[in-house]
Image (spheres, rainbow, N blue to C red):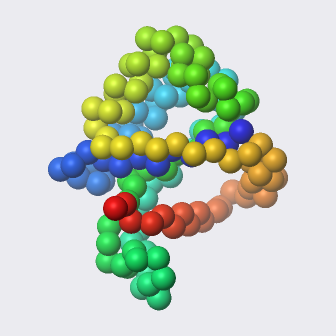
Amino acid sequence: MKFFTFITAAAGQDHRQFQQWFLKEHAPMVLEHVKGAQRYIVNLVDIIAPPVENLTGLAPEDAPAYDVITELWMGSARDFRDAARMYGSAAAAEAVQKHLASRSRAAYSAWRCAAQARQDRAEHCSLTVKIVTLPKET
């Protein structure tokens, strides 16, 4: 199964510095501790939406709601939901979660079914562009 996590930097943090911290410190920590990860992708939210007709209430000049969006493939929902199982121990789970909480304001997770994840892998090419449109937080 494919799991997305939408992460927002803590208030007062520089967007780019948070992303660099995530890439250089947090993502390697996740890779070190996550057990059974089949694939892990870190997407940096680095663009402002182009001017378009405003149908969702999100003005083009608004900052993105999230700074980082991760994609993690695991064998099952249980592997993802049970933090001790995912990280191999409760202590490792707590360490990774505290590390993220030290710099983030919020992290929300969602999942995508295994069949769609298989289709994504089948369609994967070396150069891709991903556009994720999210509503502004209220």
Q: Residue drawn 67% across and 26% down?
A: 78
Q: Residue drawn 43% across and 50% down?
A: 68
Q: Could you tell me residue 6's position as x and y percent?
A: 46, 48
Residue 20 in sight from this viewpoint:
no
Note whether 134 is above or below 105 in the view shown.
below
Q: Could you tell me residue 79's position as x and y percent?
A: 65, 25
Q: Could you tell me residue 119's position as x and y percent?
A: 80, 53
In depth, the one of 10 and 33 nearer the eye is: 10
Q: Quadrant of the C terminus?
A: bottom left
Q: Residue drawn 35% across and 49% down?
A: 8
Question: Quadrant location of residue 130?
Answer: bottom right
Question: Quadrant location of residue 106?
Answer: top left
Q: Quadrant of the N terminus?
A: top right
Q: Is residue 137 left or right of residue 56?
A: left
Q: Residue furthest front?
A: 138
Q: Residue drawn 39% across and 74% down?
A: 58
Q: Residue furthest left?
A: 12
Residue 89 in sight from this viewpoint:
yes
In depth, the one of 134 and 13 nearer the eye is: 134
In this rendering, the count of numbered labels is 0
Note whether 1 is above or below 81 in the view shown.
below
Note whether 10 is above or below 125 in the view shown.
above
Note whether 52 is above or below 89 in the view shown.
below
Q: Is residue 115 left or right of residue 73?
A: right
